[in-house]
Amino acid sequence: MITYVALPFQIKELTNSYIAVGLMGAVELIPLIIFGLYGGVLADRVDRRKMILITEFALMIMTFSLFINTQLEKPSLIWIYVVAGSFAALDGLQRPSADAILPRIVGHEDLPSASALMSLRWQTGVITGPALAGILLATTGIGTAYLVDVITFAISIVFILRVKPIKPIKKESAETLSTISSMVEGIKYATSRKDLLGTYLVDLAAMFFAMPNALFPFWADQLNATWALGLFYAAGTIGSVIVTLTSGWIKNYHHHGRAVFVAALGWGAAITLAGFSHSLFFILFFLALAGASDMVSALFRGAIWNQSIPDELRGRLAGIELLSYSVGPLGGQMRAGTFAAVTNLRTSVISGGLLCIGFVSIAAASLPKFRKYDAQTNEFAVEQRNIRAERAKSAKNSDSDQ
């Protein structure tokens, strides 16, 4: 997360261009799509823990290369884009395995609570990372920010080494299907289920139209608050943390589709209000409100995915999920940067929020099975609940026999 803030800041310092910062999203988009789908296939074929470990090490190396680049007399802008694309590719390989691990180590009924705890772990980094990045960028410089992030990757690797292997349950797909066929099988399954399709399309629309992160360095400048750049990135996560810490009710609320739809509308409305605001306090407040809405959506989307998708397809569907919640923000950076360059920053933010509300409403209206998804009655959720109960019973009987 330190690098996440430092990259657009460095591009802004080198170019002072909205488009150059927004271009980072374009550079990341294609690698994420390709490797996200491939990473999903690998997550169903290989040890998921090993995949996370290898990609984490590669991410550390790429971050160190950014530090080296800052030591040059003229840091290479091209190399920054190359590394940004590499980050997207490695994230595409890693995230499906990371997402697909959870249903293997947590009971079916506890998955919503476990997802909330995982979100809290992630949010801690997302708050402290940008805040620390803002301090480092303002005091010690970009190079130090990258170097500190390298150290955090090394610590992460130490902990990953302590995770038990998570090997695939079934190997038939790896033996009988090619990589392309495996991808197609996952895509067919996802598109055949309109409830899943709704979770992807609603989040994609929300993030594409109303993701203003590429504008944060310029927004802070316009308010004469460069010191608050880290707060712009952290505000949404603060809202997310508040939702996570009060998320006990989520386990008992079973109208998951309705919750995702309403939360996506809340995201668009909060971003619109942030665009209309001229006060730093209110902008950060509405960004926090947007983050809270996004977390409600994320928790219920995660519950739908983890509770209703078969384990033998979980990795490939995690790859598709990665695209649904990552392609939108990357495309959103391009949209926000381009709109700001053609009009101005506030017009870009406000128009994005309003477009989000419109397109989310259209997507939800077109997919009634998504809107009406109920965790207690959905046929796929009921099927997976029974399968996991049988596996747990078999494992318990096996332990008793031993």
Image: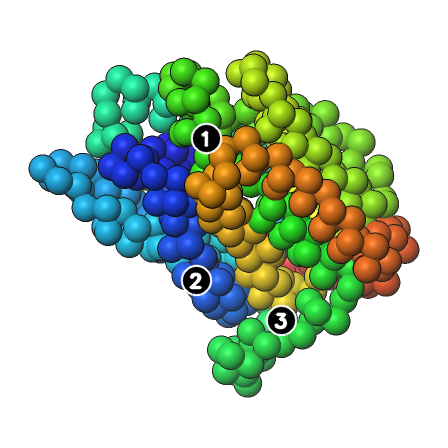
Number of other residues with Cα within 10 Å of mark 3, as a class: few under 14, some 14 to 19, many 20 or more: many
Q: Where's residue 258, x and y in %? A: 83, 45
Q: Which residue is mark 3?
A: 186
Give the colour scheme of this rendering: rainbow
Gap between marks 3 and 2 measured at Cα: 19 Å
Counting residues from the start of the chain, the first of labels 3 and 2 encountered is 2
Q: Do the residues under discs 3 and 1 have CB atoms within 8 angstroms?
A: no
Q: Where's residue 164, x and y in %? A: 48, 51
Q: Which residue is mark 1?
A: 216
Q: Residue shown at 25%/37% (left/top)?
A: 14
Q: Residue shown at 64%/58% (left/top)?
A: 402
Counting residues from the start of the chain, the first of labels 1 and 2 encountered is 2
- Numbered disc 3: secondary structure: helix
Number of other residues with Cα within 10 Å of mark 1, as a class: few under 14, some 14 to 19, many 20 or more: many
User: Can I make out residue 169 in this image?
Assistant: yes
Gap between marks 3 and 1 measured at Cα: 36 Å
Q: Amino acid at mark 1?
A: Phe
Gap between marks 1 and 2 measured at Cα: 24 Å
Number of other residues with Cα within 10 Å of mark 2, as a class: few under 14, some 14 to 19, many 20 or more: some
Q: Amino acid at mark 3?
A: Gly
User: Can I make out residue 378 in this image?
Assistant: no
